[in-house]
Amino acid sequence: MISNGKSEVILAKRLGVALPNTAAKQWFQPTPMVPILRDIDLRAHKGQCLGIVGESGSGKTTLGRALVRLLQPTSGELLFEGRDITCLDEAALRPIRNRLQMIFQEPRAALNPRRRIDDAVSQPLLTYAKTTNNNEAREQARELLRQVGLDPALGKRYPRELSGGQLQRACIARAISIRPSLIVADEIVSGLDMSSQAQVLNLLDELRQQLGLCVIFISHDLSVVRSICDEVIVLLDGRQVESGPVSRMFSRPQRRYTRSLIQAVPLPEPDSDWLEDIIDENEIGNRVKAMNIEGTTALVTGTSRGIGRELVHALIKRGAKKVYATARSLTDIEDLEKSYPGVVETLPLDITDDTATLETAEQCQDVELLINNAGVNRMSGLLAAEGIDGARLEMETNYFGTLRMCRAFAPVLKNNSGGCIVNMLSVLSHVALPLMGSLCASKAATLRLTEGVRAELEASNTLVIAVMPGAVDTDMSRDFPPPKMPAAEVAKAVLNGIVEGQEELFPGEMASGLREGLKADPKSVEKELAGYLPG
Amino acid sequence: MTKILAVRDLHLAMRTGEKLVPVLRGINLNLPQGEVHGLVGESGAGKTMLGRVILDILPPNAVVTAGHVDCATTGSQIKSGGRIFSNRGRSGISLIPQDPMTSLNPVKKIGKQMVEILQLAHTGPPRALQERAEALLAEVRIKKPKEVLKQYPHHLSGGMRQRVLIAMAFSSEPGIIIADEPTTALDVSVQRRVLRLIRDLQKERNTTILFITHDLGVVAKLCDKVSLMHSGMILEQGLVSEVFHSPSHPYTRSLLNAIPRYDQPREKLAPVAEDLQSQLIDEARKYDQQRQV
């Protein structure tokens, strides 16, 4: 989220919350803590409405409660109107409590059933000594009820005598009575029918504009969020999946999870197919990081032929917004730009060149998906080769080239709230073939590189995928005997892996078979492969 | 198609002191076998009361003042002054309640509660019923049915609890099910899966469902026909495809406009206008006066 210079009402930096797990407590042992929220970054200004969305159990309410300091954060920083309130105790919080208000989901539970509405609404005025006179407080309460569109005569009634919509308005009146600067509204319309929901949302929006309130709006219903929020953050399992302006989030969600949340909202249009296309969430590897390809911007290296070229076709077929296609020589890829005008941009790039990779990153600031596909194979044994130049070239391209690209684009991805890096490797990362020992070594090194990059980016919300196909029908493996997998199939598997959040992919029967074999009996696999390409 | 449920000119009133306050005013509803019928309205429209008349679980102060409900699967007729039940009894109809938190007994294990329900419709040794319960849980796609049977309701998530209730509702193989806001308490992604489950079970068994909800979006995706209610009257009734594309009643149009939509640019929401609300209430009053005359 961009700061644009205005002072934030609330600012959270890498906020984490852990709660005690009393069920797992053992005698004479400290209560174990369960992390609920991790590394949440958010900021909201005066007059702004920030939405927090996610499924049940994603940590929305915990975050809301931490923001108004009903809970103590366990890590990170929380600033309210520029003041650090992360670790303030109750006494130190008291002077600012009146500026932090929360409205709850169940108005019937939030109001004392034995107190009249005007007493409930005027209580904060008395507590925070805005007035000491009971009658005056009630008079103000009546005025507040009028402000939220309720008949002041309703103030004499008890909560059970009012409808859910009316009670929620009363709760809003109570929250605004002491002029807060931040209001956390936790699922305040989920218990209401459509018409009362529209009324309460309109009211909250008007008050926000009139009073310059900063509103944190928690909801699982994205349609509601769309209608009232400016920015939104999406939570899953206590992690921030993505964040950004509401219009962008709805037109092209970066994450598959956000997209599934959007699609789960039933629009009032008859469509019986809507219930058909539900994906089984168990098939998703990393639900937090799984990407949405529709509307994404990708960069693919080595697109002059083979898998790289098929990846460009497949990305566009799946609705990518833009694809940067690179190759060492521009003449090899000119036709791509011609066949997809306005979508594909071709760039010359030699990934063994430091400056060139950095310049490309500078030029492609909107990349969310980086596919490192370029690589070379000299088809040489380690000892049989004439010198070590071939091995050096393979290492320079396959290993250092990938490393260069990862280093150049990691900051770009971070600016675009995460994204995804795909490194095209080979099952050869796991085995040593006698005739191409140096290639196997470079691929194995790149596999470790991929794992290292994944570990470094763990907290930054970037999906890092290692793709390890078997023999593919391309120029690079022309000397391999069949069966070979068509390059288009590999490209398809890669995109499926991105959408399913898989961190390791073994496309094709050969690769998956080899992987199983390596798990079961690595020695026999090695023996078999040694005879696979007879010298 | 055979008619499973017929509601004819049904009037229902609540006795408060000496007065009879009308709740339902001349409801007509026909459900053929295998139809999923949406019943939509705001809070207080009388949706739940209509469901309770059909289920014959009215509160003691509610009186059917005219009309009748014929239910083929239970062989019953509910009318003013009493009810007639055939020997088929109540197992022909069941309910999926709204609140999965309060509809299960918190101090009994899921297995025990399910067996209790199964005993009403089936006979057999306890072990057979236990196995039947397990099979039912597997059918509502609960992953480890054996373990869930041994758990208490508070061990389960809201979506799981709702699945248990759905399994119980389908356990007696009822011909008709009244689903009273079964997904209102769930989040959107869980709601979508639970709706899918209800639809799949309904298709397999050709069950008739009366689906009570305030969410027109859910009706659009799940139901074949829809009735819109306000102050105890049905204002519009028809095929979902027709009602949503060309609503004839101003109230229907107004409700459709009140729904926030993520696929359209942000604009101010339009709740149902006050004058339309009061106009509808006036019409209901006039209707009552005319009936008395």
Image: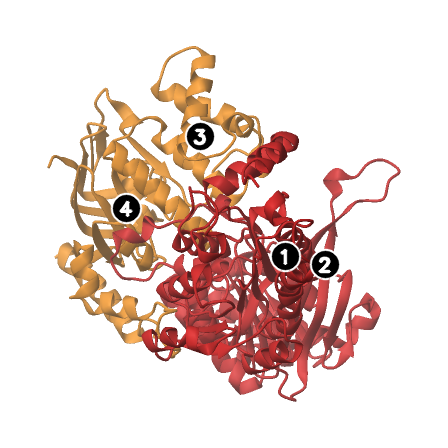
Chain colours: A red, B orange
Disc 1: which residue: A238
* Badge 1 element: loop
Gap between marks 1 and 2, in whole Å?
9 Å
C-alpha span from label 4 to label 3:
29 Å
* Disc 2: CA contacts within 10 A as few (<14), some (14-19) or many (>=20): many
Host chain of mark 2: A
Measured as percent of width and height from the top left, residue A135 is found at: 63, 78
Q: Amino acid at mark 1?
A: Gly
- How far apart marks 3 and 2 lie (CA) works out to 35 Å
On the image, the x and y values in percent for residue A259 come to: 44, 61
Tell me, yes or no, whether the two marked residues, 1 and 2, touch with CB atoms within 8 Å. Answer: yes
Tell me the mark number nearer the camera, choosing from 4 and 2.
2
Residue that badge 3 annotates: B137
Residue indicated by mark 2:
A17
Residue at the (27%, 33%) spot, across then down: B204
Specify the subunit that label 4 lies on.
B
